[in-house]
Image (cartoon, grey):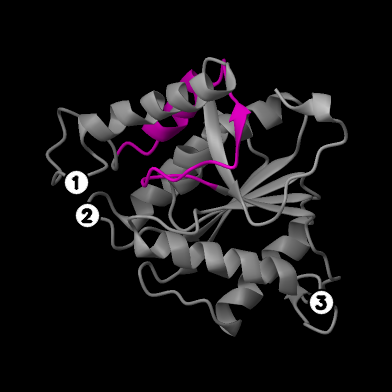
Amino acid sequence: MKLDILAFGAHPDDVELGAGGTLAKAVDRGKKVGIVDLTKGDLGTRGTPEIRLVEAQNAAAVLGVHVRENLGFRDGFFKNDEEHQREVIRMIRKYRPEVVICNAPKDRHPDHGRASELVVESNFYAGLRMISTQENGEEQEAWRPKKVYHYIQFLDLPADFSVDVTGYVEKKMESIHAHASQFYDPNSDEPKTVISSKQFHDSITGRMVEWGRIIGVDHAEGFIVDRTIGVNEITDFI
């Protein structure tokens, strides 16, 4: 299946937190969208890898994405090396997306920045035909997506552009709530974490309101780019 957008996350729930509204909107507009989680979140304080895999699929169903895979890398210990790059390259060549989105270049969790570097470099190498990868025993063709964007998660990083996701807040939050083991639940007996707090939960929509205010809409999600942004006409900007 060829996708328009392929979103990578270091952990299940990363993509929903950073770009859930953007992906839900893209699906509603007829785009083919997929998610690849690098790890199962094995080191998470709450939940289990098995629970998180189920939650990830439930969240994917909420967003309406067409496919979701998990590469099973070691949470906390995966590297930006050839072994891991080849697996990311395999996903990029398998789904041949036009756009890749991934974790922020810098964040509170060290895995996020490392995942960002891994995906960015793999995105380039995926276009080199001399790098051989196979899928189901067949040689894959080289493919390099046209754009790589970074969603923003925990740290208050400045956005290079924002996507209007007005009307998609409820679906985004529903996809986040699908990861029930991880986030705010006043009745949970699990250990408390930074992201399981009510403050963190409320900050998700608060940040979307702020990004929206800046561009003159109700809600938005911010993204970071590694290259100059181009538009067809100056009137294309909101």
Residue drawn at point x = 12 percent, y = 39 percent: 189
Report if residue 179 lies within the magenta region. yes
- Callout 3 crowding tier (Cα within 10 Å): few <14, some 14–19, many ≥20: few
Report if residue 108 lies within the magenta region. no
Q: Nearer the viewer, residue 66 or 171?
A: 171
The kind of secondary structure element at disc 1 is: loop
Q: CA distance from mark 1 to mark 2?
A: 7 Å
Residue drawn at point x = 37 percent, y = 39 percent: 179
Residue 234 position in % (x across, y down): 82, 29
**Amino acid residing under circle 2:** Thr
Residue 9 position in % (x across, y down): 51, 54
| Residue placed under numbered mark 3 in the picture | 128
**Amino acid residing under circle 1:** Thr
| Residue placed under numbered mark 2 in the picture | 45
| Mark with earlier residue (3, 2) | 2
Residue 63 position in % (x across, y down): 57, 31
| Residue placed under numbered mark 1 in the picture | 193
User: What segment carries the magenta color?
Assistant: 151-180
Residue 3 position in % (x across, y down): 77, 47
The kind of secondary structure element at disc 2 is: loop
The kind of secondary structure element at disc 3 is: loop
Q: Are marks 3 and 2 in contact (CB under 8 Å)?
A: no
Q: Are marks 1 and 2 in contact (CB under 8 Å)?
A: yes
**In the image, farthest residue toward the front:** 234
Let me know if residue 34 appears in the view: yes
